[in-house]
Amino acid sequence: MKKVFSFDAETNGLWGQAFAIGALVYDENGVEIARFVGRLPETEVKDEWVRANVLPQLTAVPVTHTDYASLLADFAKFYLANKADADIVVHMGVPVESKLLIDMHSSGLIGDWDGPYPLCDVAGNLQQAGEDPTSVDGYVRKHGLEVPEFGTTHNPLYDSAVAAVAYRHLLSRRTV
């Protein structure tokens, strides 16, 4: 099995800019080998649904950046340093995670050929396996899989971890 680079972002509304990004890189054996976490201050979050439902899940995630440009630049550096020879994994990556990639490219932080080829959206793997494509949480519960302790849904490290766990499990079950 290949290295897995799983990332997630929390955004200011579904189509807004990211204010928190998490990424985890696992080696071929599922051992974490790299981690990125970045967050902007709560004052950057204007969407009321996000303020009520997402911010409470981020109390353990420290504020690391003051603006989107610096958060995006640091994530782009991490992405470029860790994407080689990895399956790049998201869960339901449109519009949120795909927007990060587009913003990195539009800002000149990644080049034309630096995108993930392919971007593996675990939702499609779940659907192909006859599972609910909208819930990696449900999948890991159903199969008794363990997810590292990063909190719960809407914590970008947790969301990265649970997507990676589901993805690796689904790959291990495939038949050729």
Image (cartoon, rainbow, N blue to C red):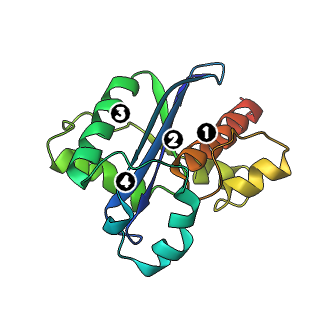
Task: Name the quadrant containing residue 96.
Answer: bottom left
Residue at image mark 2: 89
Q: 112 above or below 28?
A: below
Residue at image mark 3: 79
Which x, y percent locates residue 10? 45, 59
* Residue at the bottom extreme, as displayed: 48
Instruction: Assess disc 3: are there few (<14), some (14-19) or many (≥20) residues with their C-alpha within 10 Å of its C-alpha.
Output: many
Residue at disc 3, secondary structure: helix
What amino acid does circle 4 point to? Ser
| Front disc: 3 or 2 | 3
Distance between the alpha carbons at the discs numbered 4 and 3: 13 Å
Along the line of sight, the residue nearer the viewer: 25 or 122: 25
Residue at disc 2, secondary structure: strand
What amino acid does circle 1 point to? Ala
Q: 174 above or below 107?
A: above
Q: 103 above or below 116?
A: below
Which x, y percent locates residue 78? 35, 31
Instruction: Assess disc 2: are there few (<14), some (14-19) or many (≥20) residues with their C-alpha within 10 Å of its C-alpha.
Output: many
Distance between the alpha carbons at the discs numbered 2 and 1: 7 Å
Contact (Cβ within 8 Å) of mark 4 with mark 3 = no
Which x, y percent locates residue 98? 37, 53
What amino acid does circle 3 point to? Tyr
Q: Which mark is residue 98?
A: 4
